[in-house]
Amino acid sequence: MSVRVQIVRSVLSPMGHDEALNRIAVVYVDREEHRVYAPAKASGPAIEWLDHAFVRQPENSNFGSELEVSGSRAVQIL
């Protein structure tokens, strides 16, 4: 298994509206892309928000859409 992590934002600041997402990182496991997000109102060091972070994956059938990754797979990514 090959893992690569690209940090997008190491320090977060609140986004302008609740629907926005604070992207922390993009994690590649083999050839699969996973995006790690914090809540819109997150601020401060991103590492402090990992307990509240969630993982999404691009949806191949609908351009621009993402699917939530949950369970043990999300825990592995985080």
Image (spheres, rainbow, N blue to C red):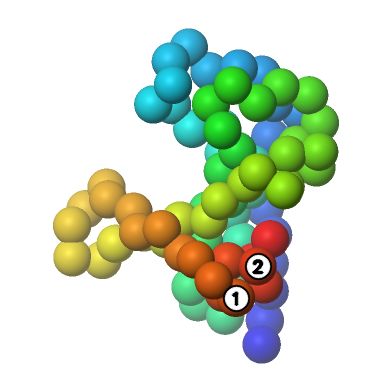
Looking at this view, is 39 or 10 the one in front?
39
The quarter holding residue 74 reads bottom right
Q: Secondary structure at mark 2?
A: helix
Residue extending farthest to the left is 62
Residue indicated by mark 1: 72
Q: Quadrant of the C terminus?
A: bottom right
Numbered marks: total: 2
What's the residue at 18%, 65% (across, down)?
61
Q: How far across and how far down the image is residue 38, in percent?
A: 60, 38
Mark 1 crowd level (few <14, some 14–19, many ≥20, 10 Å Cα): few
Closer to us: 62 or 78:
78
Q: Is residue 66 above or below residue 48?
A: below
Q: Is residue 3 above or below residue 17?
A: below
Q: Residue at x 27, y 47 (%)?
A: 64
Residue 75, label in figure: 2
Q: Position of residue 49 (x, y in %)?
A: 73, 39
| CB atoms of marks 1 and 2 within 8 Å | yes
Height in image: 4 above or below 30?
A: above
- Residue 19, compared with residue 76, is above or below; it is above
